[in-house]
Amino acid sequence: MSSRGLVIRVALMVRGFGILLLLLLTWVLGNAATAYAVAPSSVEVYDIAGVLDRARLVDALEATDFHEPTKVVVYTYNGRTEDNLNEEVLRFARGEHKEWISSDGQKWADGLFIFALDPVGRHVGTYMGEDRKVSLEQRDDIQDAAKELLRDAQWTDGTIAGVRRAAVLINQPWYESSAFLVTVWVSGGTVALGAGAWIVVRAVTRSASRKEVDRGDRSYANVSLDLEVTELNAGSIPESSTYGGQVLEKYRTFLNRYHLASGLSNKVHALSRSQLGERKNLRLTRQYADAAAELDALDDVIADSNSLLNRTSTWPTAWDRQLAPFRSDLAGLEQLLAKRNGQGDAATAAALRSFRDESLRGIEKWTADLGEGRITPEKALDRLNEARSHLALLLEHHAETVINGYAKNEREAELMRKEMRSVRSSSNQNHRRTYEPSILGAIYPSYHFFSVATFNSGLDTGVSSVGAARGGDGSTTGYGSSGGSFSGSGSSSGF
């Protein structure tokens, strides 16, 4: 049987299992009950921290459907990072609301669900009666549903999200549970998926390999067509120029790297359709595409170096290309400062805005001075280098502001620093290196300048890593030294 025939046969098999499973699930869920959707028996809000929009919160929670009538309590207070939120909630209940506790004083009362929040200490907790309790993993799920919003100080929306997730999980019928759905799909589709997974993985890998080959071919074609022109441009660059000399150093390895790229081109184009689906050959096609892209950027730099340093007729266009990365950074500053966790009101943010305004005026002056011959091309590049280096320093200072604003301790702060350094140095495999087609970008290593795009990427990666680490710390389930023998179902975690 041909490979095409095999694909069609597997696809039909998968579709057949899919139809059967869909019919089964439709029958089960269709006969299950919308009757389980009931409003909370009551909603009580004790916003001691003063961070909630009470009216909007109550309206949203009263409109939330639970599987069983449930008393919903929301409690907030301003604590500290080192506090045990579980202990605080129990203390409040014992002192102010004994009806939340069972008659024997050991559990939470039946029919009760408590959502607790400490916006200062940055903890969120969930507590419930024995007839409403869920597993620890599900309590984590409820808290996680709120955390993204809570991290952005959206206290009301985060609380609503958490309670709504609790409504789904508390007393959830067996046929709605993820475990049941997974079991159905796994047991019903194992054979089909087992046969099809290999084909799917190979097809995805093959598609990715082809895209890399296409990317490499575009760059390689550009370099090949301009090969003679690149040689002529390199021969005209003044070696006495500081920048020209360094670009020529890059050119001296250009032909060697071109021959290496040619060899990679021959290898990837010799791969069969089947071989393109292998992971090792996907790595080979990426190597080819990256090598060709670097050469494509470098031959543009060689052309611009000749044009700018010798002030040929096309020097204004070449100069604009040198300014483009810096202009892009300046244009992206406000978006960076306005984003979540961007610390846009900090002193370091004000310094960045001031530098942006000053630099936009400076760019106009450098260009006018260069055009009228008051400064040399080397001096113009010096000024651009100094400005971009200063921006990198200001971004480093602001990075510390952002880290200190988000991290709750030195361990988290160091994790964020590590992630930002990793992205900046392009050592993180999730962030492929790009080749800046400018003179400064060619002669300095990728980490010399700190771009706004790199800052954004590093910040996002750092926040994500810290968030994962916080989740990995697990939940706090005990009620502290004052809890005594109390063992009600509940836990809390940081955000």
Image (cartoon, helix red, strand yellow):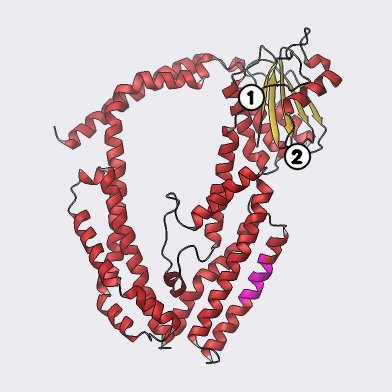
Q: Position of residue 468 (x, y in %)?
A: 56, 38
Residue that sits furthest to the top in the current view: 104
- Name the residue that disc number 2 marks: 120
Please provide percent x and percent y for residue 331.
Answer: 58, 66
Q: How would you rate the neighbour count of disc 2 (Cα within 10 Å): few for under 14, some for 14-19, many for 20 or more?
A: few
Q: Regarding mark 1 in the picture, which secondary structure is present there?
A: helix
- Residue at 30% x, 49% y: name it: 283
Residue nearest the viewer, comparing 358 with 172? 358
Task: Residue 75: name its quadrant.
Answer: top right
Question: In this picture, which residue range is highlighted in magenta?
Answer: 352-360
Furthest residue in direction right, as rendered: 96
* Distance between mark 2 and mark 1 Cα atoms: 23 Å
**Residue at the spot of label 1:** 166
- Whether 246 is drawn above or below 22: the answer is below
The structure residue drawn at horizontal position 52% and vertical position 19%, both measured from the top left corner, is 176
Residue 110 against residue 65 in the figure, above or below: above
> Looking at this rendering, what residue extends furthest in the bottom direction?
373
